Image (cartoon, helix red, strand yellow):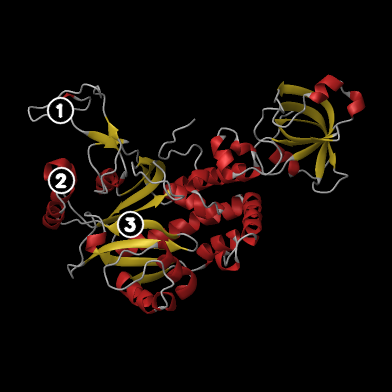
Amino acid sequence: MQLKTISDLLTQNTVIPEVEIKGWVRTFRANRFIALNDGSTINNIQCVVDFEKFDEATLKRVTTGAAIHIKGELVESQGKGQSVEIQVASLEILGDSDPETYPIQPKKHSFEFLRENAHLRTRTNTFSAVMRLRSSLSFAIHKYFNEHGFYYMHSPIITGSDAEGAGEMFKVSSLDPKNPPLTEEGKVDYTKDFFGKETNLTVSGQLEAETYAMSLGKVYTFGPTFRAENSNTSRHLAEFWMIEPEVAFMDLAGNMDLAEDFMKSVIKYILEHNREDLEFLDQRLQEEDKKKPQAERSDMSLIEKLNFVTDNHFKRVSYTEAIDILRNCKPNKKKKFKYLINEWGTDLQSEHERYLVEKHFKCPVILFDYPANIKAFYMRLNDDGKTVRAMDILFPGIGEIVGGAQREERLDILKEKMAAIDIPEEELWWYLDLRKFGTAVHSGFGLGFERLVMFATGMSNIRDVIPFPRTPQNAEF
């Protein structure tokens, strides 16, 4: 007898005389109907027990959360809600679950409560669906890059450079914090530290990925990144995952083509392979929406948002054109925006980005050619001397989801830009070497993986799309 998953069994439409299944009890009703789940699907399988044939002491141990092993016959279901069920022939308790203390009871729990029990929250329908989608998106990302000739590169987690130039990094040190060695000036002497210099957890693998792109052609990183930003918002984590492709000999237009094709591909993958989970989450969102005031309700369902991305061409708009649209739009003129647009050079907020996508163009938008002073030093300066070849992809519901650029390949201009924001050349000597030895046009982008999972699942808090969130004052589990 072959052990199958519940997902396998629920696709059967014939009687199978002998099946066996292992899983966790969701509910046990009337001493007769066990709803069993093994994590392979959002759907439970109903296991029907003839209680007269089983020991009462065993049946008392069939409680919510218990792990059990069932053997029986798969038959057509007599009840509503499922096509097949198992007539139980044998029942073994693999692991008891005390109903007095098991936290995930069959009732509605707040997300805050479930975060406090993150080690068990994937036993709920919502979180099992979210994490299966997270897994599918991960696979779709690797599949896309593998099929398009990219090499997977593992960028270092420990780094001596700050790719974003924003500070806010976690220090990595083996020095005694109570009694570190000091220099003659009284500062911490990092030459005595493990790496012989000051090091941090990385905020991005981009700079290292560029080095590999300039020899292997097309590479991508997909790994954990860290930011010590003391922020408790629903959009910030201290530890998160980034996807960062870099491609040699590709300009900004090619970068936009790649990013659009990539985003459509990974979303199409989950629409094809995770339909049941998406439909469940879509229904959950619609129920939540009904409780909100009309003005706060979403114009699109979850699946409609995903199709909105896959079915529409991404409109390409310069930052300058976008500012003109926003400056003259009704919400700005009537002061409905929280942040009013008055002048060129303003950094856009998510309310502006969403207006462009959802109200003005009614399709995903790629903004490009941003003011140089609001973008990173490594972005290629345009001939106007004011803008850089940056691009951001804007989606409905969230605004910016992808940020990228053509990289500055000219040594002299890159040096000038580094000097302007006090980045010492000796700190990034290896990065400058790429511009000395065989420099060429190259481009790439970054996608925060959790932002993608939020978009794909409709979850509103980033802490609910990563297994164990790391946030200020919280490193539990």
At label 2, which amino acid type do we have? Asp
Q: Earlier in the sequence, mark 3 or mark 2?
A: 3
Residue at coordinates 43% horizontally, 65% vertically from top-left? 351
Residue 58, horizontal then vertical, whole percent: 81, 21
Name the element at disc 3: strand
The one nearer the camera, 372 or 275, is 372
Instruction: Nearest to the eye among marks 3 and 2: give it.
Output: 3
Which residue is label 3 attached to? Answer: 404
Where residue 433 is drawn, which disc sits there?
2
Quarter of the figure with residue 379? bottom left
Quarter of the figure with residue 28? top right
Q: Are marks 1 and 2 in contact (CB under 8 Å)?
A: no
Q: Earlier in the sequence, mark 1 or mark 2?
A: 1
Residue 256 as seen in the image, left or right of residue 291: left
Which residue is label 1 attached to? Answer: 189
Q: Is residue 357 above or below residue 84?
A: below
Residue 376 as seen in the image, left or right of residue 421: right
